[in-house]
Image (cartoon, helix red, strand yellow):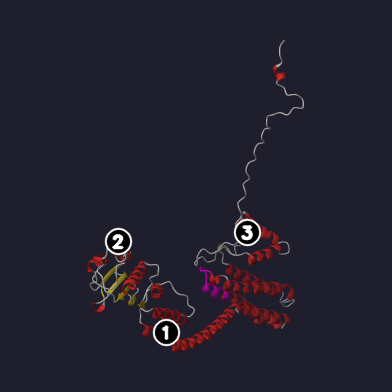
Amino acid sequence: MSTNVQGAHAPEPGAVSARPPAAAPSAAPSVAPPPRPRLSRPRSCMATGVSAGLATHLGWPVGVVRAIFVVLALFSGLGILLYFWFWAFMPFEVATSESDTVTRSAPVGWGLVVLSALAAGLALYLGRNNYYYEAWPFAEVAPPLLAAIALAVAASFWVTFVDRIDPERGRRTEKLVRTAVTVVLGVLVISVLFGPFAAQRSIYAIVYALLLLLGIALVFAPVLLRLWRELGAERTRRVREEQRSEIAAHLHDSVLQTLALIQNRAGASSEVARIARAQERELRSWLFEADAPADSDLATDLRDWAAALELDYPVRVDVVVVGESGERASGEIAAAAREAMLNAARHAGGEVSVYIEGTAHAVEVFVRDRGPGFAVADVAADRLGVRESIIGRMRRAGGSATVGVGAGGTGTEVRLRFGAPLTNGAKPAASAEQTTQNGATTGG
């Protein structure tokens, strides 16, 4: 008798199958949409940057955004109000540098001048056509006349507060635009007061003239406001300088003289003299440099470095500057001079003088001390303070450096030059090590 194999392996009714259920297909991982750009106006725009900023934030074409504003403007001026709201509260993009200013490609100021002139022409046209009938009727002439005044004032404010800081326009555009709108309003004033309409002695002519004169005053209001602010700032600056001069005179007669006396009595290498010197330098800097920020030029950098060395080493460093130079603190000559000053303070001590002479084409720095002296040839090969940090650095930068005996045959003088070639028989940097003699600064 045959056996039903399929029935033998069939599960009984009600039995639980040991086979695990088939796993459902895994869903694809969801990818979060990229974040939208920050709502801000670009620093390089056509006029205000509102449409371009909204288009970038929403990911729409800029033309679509501008069309939406135009369509909304047809509904009781909603688009105009919305546009000005965005302009008032939407910030510009963060500047990447100090030279990253806001620039506009559209001459908005001149566009307002043209619109003002067209409105003025329309007012004159309507007034002349109605001259024989209603003598400049208020209902017809007033709207274009008021529009001409408003556009002229808007042009003046725009060029004063917007175009004035634009590097592509500036003060010249401001003066030209203000002159143009003044001419437009002046022509209207002359037409109202001295034209054929004045013969009718209409009350409207007087009202129009007063409105036009008020518009001309508003055109020049930004200039008067700026002059008033500058006058207030100058008055505040003068009062501050007078107070600073009184404080400086009082401190010079008391505190500064006391600090100088302490230095003379204690000696240049004592701890008390070092502290007194540092306090005197800081106080003089506060008194005589006023509120001007310290420029990062060579002289300022070496003065700050000298003040730091006086706090760390028993040394007094005097920095003297003659002439003017455009050399910056980040240049190679500044780094080489700092190394020479550090060597003098660390190994010579006492008094160190730094003399900076700058011209339009070159700058020289002399670092002199009165130490025991050294010879570059006697310095160990692994000590690269003079060979590489001073001589080598200046040679690689295209300058020169020499190390020799100081004035009077004592001490060391390090001479650094950057700019025009050396004259008067001075030796170049390539022979600096060969001409080095005993001096005070060591080759650390």
Q: Amino acid at mark 1?
A: Leu
Magenta-highlighted residues: 166-178
Q: Is residue 422 visible?
A: no
Q: Is residue 168 magenta?
A: yes
Is 444 within the magenta? no
Find residue 24 and report its horizontal and vertical position in percent: 67, 36
Please indicate whether residue 9 sits to the left or right of residue 340 in the image.
right
Give the numbered dot on residue 259. Answer: 1
**Rendered residue at 27%/70% (across/down):** 403
CB-based contact (under 8 Å), mark 1 and mark 2: no
**Secondary structure at numbered mark 3:** helix
Question: What residue lies at 73% left-to-right and 29% top-to-bottom?
Answer: 16
**Callouts 3 and 2 close, C-beta under 8 Å:** no
Location of mark 2 (residue): 382
Q: CA distance from mark 1 to mark 3?
A: 63 Å
Which of pointers 1 and 3 lies earlier in the amino acid sequence? 3
User: In which quadrant will I find the C terminus?
Assistant: bottom left
**Which of marks 2 and 1 precedes in the sequence?**
1
Please indicate, yes or no, whether residue 39 appears anywhere in the rendered image: yes
Near mark 1 (Cα within 10 A), the count class, few <14, some 14-19 or many ≥20, is some
Q: How many marks?
A: 3
Q: Image quarter for residue 269?
A: bottom left
- Residue 162: give x, y in percent of width and height: 57, 70
Residue type, mark 2 in image: Asp
Between tags 1 and 3, which lies in front? 1
